[in-house]
Amino acid sequence: MLQRPAPRLRRRAATGVAVGLLVTMGTMWAPHTPGVPAADASTVEPGSAMSAITSAPVRPPLCTEEQIAAVDFDNCALMFDGNPTDHGFPAPPFPGNQFIITPVTADEWTPLTVGASGPIVTVLQEKLKATTPLITQDGKFGSQTATAVKKAQETLSLPQTGVVDAATAAALDMLVRAELGAYPPPGFVWTGNDYNNSPALAEWEKRLVRGTVRTDPIASALFEGFLADLRRGTFRLDQAGTYSFRCTATTVRNCKGIGMSSLSYHAWGLAVDVNYTANPLQQVYHSTDACAANVKMNIPDWVLKTAQHWGMFWGGWYSCPKAGQRSVFKDPHHFEFRGTPATAAAIIAKNSAEGAARAWVPELEDLLLSCGDRGASVLRIRELLPADYRPTEVASAQTTFTATLAASIAKWQADNNLPATGAFDAATATALGLTVRHTEVFPVLHLNSCGDAVKALQTKLGLTVTGTFGTTTMNTLRSWQLSNRLPPTGVTDTRTSRALGLALATPEPPPSTTVPVSSGDPPTDSTGPPILRAAIPLSFGARNASVSALQRALTAAGYVTPVTGRFGTTTLRNLRAFQAANKLRLSSTVSLGAAQLLGLTPTPKLPVRYGQTGDQVRLVQRALRDRGVNLRVDGRFGWATRRAVIAFQRSAGIKVTAIVDSATARALGW
């Protein structure tokens, strides 16, 4: 992983103006421009990019052949259609379908159409594989089967009706009646959840690799690497299951009456389910677009990016190939590998090579941790604590934020005149010499969290105060979130903590502890450097004054960029170098976060209107909120934002358009 450098001065070579970083005990300050008053700490929005949860994530574009050949999946989703055997993995035994087949005449044949189901539809789907190889054999005649029937009818020079009449059945050699016989067949023993350890699977299961999880030998290192990165990023893995010989949960789990195309990727050892109690399989309904509806899950955005890094396909994506569906299944705990054996080997080789770029996962500087958290960062906390305060615990507890560790931290905090929160908060991290990269004021509590922060949450929710975050606390929190129009994460994400009014105690910095970092440059006059404005988003290929401002800001940050006003390859290369050094997502677009880190004054790219999402909407929402409008900053220009814009336009005496145009932008101070 690229190491984030210590904060450094940003200099304007032409003017000699230095922009320093003000550091105050317990408070993280934004870069301060001389001549401009620093923002009060209370105005800094709490949050951390590394704890963000997008409860309705949009599937990335599917990987192209070029991206697959380059083994570059960080910005795409790797998904081949079909099951692993279609991709080149070995074929497992299958319970099969012991159908009793009885020939019938054309007069006895009952036409099959959309809505039909049962063994005869499974027989049909098997026949249709000749023209539609990847058809799902689920025994249900839906739109996919109807399309496949039409394709077969075209091939057979029959009328393309999508209905299997006697003529179509005869042409497909399936003028039969199909009934299901004894099930399961000999050698397969159904446990109620899977066929694991059945005699018929003995040889198949011998080939699987037992590591942290039980996986296919070809892809074992891929799954182990993915899970290791989750632990490295302090994602608490309470549950992680891979091998389970069964059909998919959305069909018939024991495979009765359906075909091998419905066999779960778990049966190959090519899928892993993580923390399924907190992130259950769910059917989501919505009047216009279920794919955009919120899902009950607490999977952080960085986990999904890490999955892409390892070529994993997330279960929250595969039900949404297009928008407009009113009902979809989402499986947020599920990750599977949908590539070929050669692709798996290439990913493993690339990600395990010496000096390879690692997945970007949170580090201790990015997180506010508390009792119940687990991962590599907890071990760093133990190492940072002075020896006299380190608790003696068994080796297996070293990466867990135990109640004992929380008590030790609270004692150290009290002895160093800090609020004894027992959490590894920003004040504690700063005092122990870390450069904090977040503004969180309350821990992200989750299943198995513990301590005083959990007690505070339970008090807010009106629950019995136990100090232990269990399923009752999670489900009650989700109900509260839904009733307050918040994503049902079931954790105290930043928006939820703020809405509940939860915050840890923070120290008041005495004036004498605020020390500007000096650059050694001569002092500037009171007017300070010129304000560099840039319309966000600003992307590769643009030609305008915003690009010139970006180029000046990159040069001031130490990435010398000619000021041409054209966003070309040199500007892009320097932008990406800045993004990498500051642990931002590599992109050809200047995000709001990058603009602020560069010292730019971001303005929205106009016009901004109803239906838009992104940083330009966040800028509008923040500007409206700064002017006293009660508005949530969520980056979505919905009805609430539209009403707020209209109200502002009326109060400012400008034309009411419900659109943030140039006149509205000027009134907002841009």
Image (cartoon, rainbow, N blue to C red):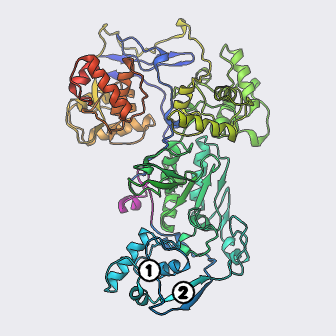
Q: Nearer the viewer, residue 641 or 311?
A: 641
Q: Is 531 placed left or right of 441 in the picture?
A: left
Q: What residue type is disc 1 on?
A: Leu
Relative side of 59 to 571, left or right? right
Q: Quadrant of residue 402?
A: top right
Query: Can the viewer see residue 509?
Result: yes
Query: Residue flagged by tag 2: what amino acid is it?
Result: Arg
Q: How many marks?
A: 2
Decide: is 608 above or below 152. Answer: above
Mark linked to residue 269: none
Residue 360 at least partly seen: no
CA separation, marks 1 and 2?
Answer: 17 Å
The structure residue drawn at horizontal position 44% and vertical position 51%, both measured from the top left corner, is 291
In the drawing, what numbered circle is on residue 128? Answer: 1
Where, by quadrant of the figure, is residue 66 drawn? bottom left
Task: Please state the extent of the stretch shown in magenta in the rendering.
Answer: 62-80
Furthest-front residue in this view: 107
Position above or below: 485 against 626: below
Would you identify the image quadrant in which residue 552 lies? top left
Mark identifier at residue 177: 2
Percent position (x, y) of residue 485? 49, 35
Seen from the viewer's position, the closer of residues 562 and 654 is: 654
Q: Main secondary structure of the magenta part?
A: loop
Say whether residue 327 is left or right of residue 537.
right
Q: Which residue does the image show at 51% across and 69% down from the upper left?
A: 83
Per the image, label 2 sits on a secondary structure element best described as strand
Q: Could you classify mark 2 by the number of other residues whose Cα lies within 10 Å: few (under 14), some (14-19), or many (20 or more)? A: some
The residue depicted at 57 percent of the width and 88 percent of the height is 101
Q: Is residue 247 magenta?
A: no
